[in-house]
Image (cartoon, rainbow, N blue to C red):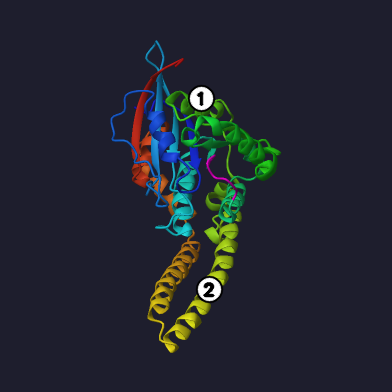
Amino acid sequence: MDGESEGIILLLGVTGAGKSYFINQLKKKGPVTERPVREGHTMRSQTSRCQLVQMVLKDDDGDERSISVVDTPGFDDTERPDGEVLAEITEFLATQHALGIPLKGVLYLHKITDNRMTGSSGTYLRLLQSLIGDSAMTNVVLVTTMWYMLRDEYEGEGLRRQTQLSENYWKPLTDKGAGVTKFEGTPESAWSIVRKLAPKEPVVLDYQRQIVEEGRDLVHTNAGHSLLQKLESTKVEYSIKLKNLEDQHDEAIAIGDKAVARDKEREIIEAQDVLRRIDKSVAKLGAQPGPRIKEGVARAMKGQTAGRAVTVLAAILNITLFVVQLVVGV
């Protein structure tokens, strides 16, 4: 049921930005045969693997064409190291590129309810830039979400935040052609945002060239190097924090303050966990997936038609594929 694939749109954002909610609203545009993606409102990503929604448009003659949207796991997840998340997004982008499925662009979701840009938000925005590259920035739309969580009297404040994002934090992207829009939280709004990218000429991201065509390992890509710098900085910060906590714990033990000692033991375990997650992320960045993915795609496409590329993509990556039927013109 692939029909003619017009391409794929990638959803990116930190955990809790509303990617799964966006996907669920998109699926309300027509009948869907699979169960909905869970929506994540905690710091644990509800998208544990990439998931794909294929919007199939049928005309009066019965001909079909499709545009697909993929929901990716979010960065800054308390349960999954960032290196693991980048590795999974890499698998998708490299396989999509190797299959020759056009990439129409990227939707980057950001909560309008965030009062300020945190350090991690800035880090992941720089990671987004390094994934995409300047030449593909015109195929990016920066989407503010969670407007439905603002009370009516605070909508003006939300609009002020969006203007501030556009004119300050997002300016390096918008200056290179990225668009900015507001997701109203409805199926119609989700579909109208998808339609902003659907007519665009396909692009190849810098990251895809580096992984698939140049065969680099993750750490020697622009995006991988950007993430590594963030991980190394965080590791230094938490190593110092751990040493201070251990000293404070020893002092509490020496003076017999058991309550403070217990608190410090808990904080020490938390800091050790962060450092373990960093080490796990760094290890993931050593992977060189390009050659393996190209070989896998070649095997999977034997005997398959190009029109089934989206189905093959879902099968290779074990992605949940949702198909939504639409009438052309809706």
Crowding at label 2, few (<14), some or many (≥20) Cα neighbours within 10 Å?
some
Q: Give how far across and how far down residue 42 sits, in percent.
A: 40, 49
Instruction: Choose mark 1 or mark 2, whichever is in front.
Output: 2
Where disc 2 sits, the SS reads helix
Instruction: Classify the position of the N terminus by image quarter.
Output: top left
The residue sitting at 58% across, 41% down in the picture is 204
Question: Does any portion of residue 309 appear in the rendered image?
Answer: no
CA–CA distance between discs 1 and 2? 47 Å
The residue sitting at 56% across, 25% down in the picture is 199
Q: Give how far across and how far down residue 214 sits, in percent.
A: 57, 53
Q: Which residue is mark 1?
A: 192
Q: Earlier in the sequence, mark 1 or mark 2?
A: 1
The residue sitting at 36% across, 36% down in the picture is 311
Magenta span includes 87? no
Q: Which residue is mark 2?
A: 241
Marker disc for residue 40: none
Q: Give how far across and how far down residue 131 sits, in percent.
A: 58, 48
Majority secondary structure of the magenta segment? loop
Over which residues does the magenta segment extend?
111-117
Instruction: Classify the position of the C terminus by image quarter.
Output: top left
Q: Give how far across and how far down residue 247 sits, in percent.
A: 50, 82
